[in-house]
């Protein structure tokens, strides 16, 4: 299914346990919109309820079968396009909010205050359905993916997106952690990836390897640029390292570039002096 075929508001069943509704918030950063996943049968977990949009919240509530209830509202991370509807949905349905507590930075949604903070490798059970929380720092430091174990379907939030690379957002976001989190996913039995934006992806290990390769190629461009320039500011490096990215996206690309630079500094390859980076 192409991105153009993904429509907001439609309930799409992905398996006997999992359905998806796309929020009406398409953009350059969110693709077709934020994916909200409904997991379970009688007791249901809503994973990434999305933005505080009345039509989307009502679509989630309307999708709950007669006799079932929303037991948990669960988020992968507290960015507004994933978590902002959580409080409203919990208040209307009596559901409990679960997930990582927001960090104290201006990028995160402070309205999301979980009643239960998930832990790495914790298994949440809805009847016969098991949801495993996997800590995947990188995009930001407190990001989690959720593995629906019976389906071997990993709901990836913003750790992996379909059709686009993920922005790494320092200081919480960390490129070294991101690559390590991708490697960690190899140790789990995965059949499909359900991203926070875009359609379901098959061949998870190939997807993961492709992302790792892409990031390392980008890092090579950083190193080549620094070998030529010897020292450079973030503004000077961006058009060289991201010459394949539209200019309008360069302010966003700078966040990931900064994450690459911090990683290389941690590895004693680069050094920051005031606003310049030195080889």
Image: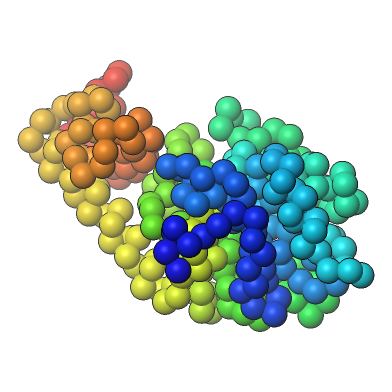
Measured as percent of width and height from the top left, residue 66 is found at 89, 69
Measured as percent of width and height from the top left, residue 238 is found at 24, 33
Image colouring: rainbow
User: Which residue is rendered at x = 50% and y = 68% of the image?
Assistant: 200
Residue toward you, 4 or 196: 4
Is residue 246 left or right of 21 when viewed as pictured? left
Which image quarter: residue 255? top left
User: Which residue is rendered at x = 63% and y = 31% of the image?
Assistant: 104
Query: Does the rendering let one see residue 58?
Result: yes
Q: Quadrant of the N terminus?
A: bottom left
Work out which residue is located at the far left of the displayed protein and give it: 228
Q: Is residue 13 above or below residue 219?
A: below
Q: Is residue 221 above or below residue 132?
A: above
User: Which residue is rendered at x = 54% and y = 65% of the image?
Assistant: 194
Query: Does the rendering let one see residue 271?
Result: no
Is residue 137 left or right of 261 when viewed as pictured? right
Measured as percent of width and height from the top left, residue 263 is found at 34, 43
User: Which residue is rendered at x = 28% and y = 61% of the image?
Assistant: 213
Residue toward you, 21 or 50: 21
Measured as percent of width and height from the top left, residue 240 is found at 17, 36
Residue toward you, 268 or 261: 261
Which image quarter: residue 122? bottom right
Q: Quadrant of the C terminus?
A: top left
Label count reads 0
């Amino acid at each position: 299914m192409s991105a153009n075929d993904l429509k907001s508001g439609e309930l799409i069943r992905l398996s006997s346990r999992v359905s998806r509704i796309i929020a009406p918030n398409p953009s350059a950063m969110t693709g077709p919109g934020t994916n909200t996943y409904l997991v379970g049968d009688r007791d249901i977990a809503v994973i990434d309820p999305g933005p505080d949009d009345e039509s989307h919240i009502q679509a989630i509530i309307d999708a709950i079968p007669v006799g079932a209830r929303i037991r948990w509202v669960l988020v992968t991370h507290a960015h507004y396009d994933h978590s902002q509807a959580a409080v409203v949905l919990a208040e209307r349905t009596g559901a409990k909010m679960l997930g990582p507590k927001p960090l104290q930075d201006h990028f995160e949604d402070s309205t999301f205050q979980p009643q239960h903070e998930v832990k790495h490798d914790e298994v949440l059970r809805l009847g016969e359905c098991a949801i495993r929380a996997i800590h995947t720092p990188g995009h930001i430091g407190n990001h989690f993916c959720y593995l629906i174990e019976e389906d071997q379907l990993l709901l990836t939030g913003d750790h992996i997106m379909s059709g686009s690379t993920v922005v790494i957002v320092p200081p919480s976001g960390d490129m070294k952690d991101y690559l390590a989190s991708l490697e960690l996913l190899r140790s789990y039995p995965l059949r499909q990836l359900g991203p926070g934006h875009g359609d379901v992806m098959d061949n998870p290990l190939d997807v993961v390897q492709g992302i790792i390769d892409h990031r390392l190629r980008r890092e090579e461009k950083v190193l080549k640029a620094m070998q030529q320039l010897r020292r450079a500011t973030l503004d000077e490096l961006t058009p060289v390292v991201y010459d394949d990215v539209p200019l309008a996206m360069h302010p966003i690309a700078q966040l990931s570039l900064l994450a690459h630079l911090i990683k290389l500094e941690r590895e004693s390859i680069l050094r920051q002096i005031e606003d310049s980076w030195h080889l």
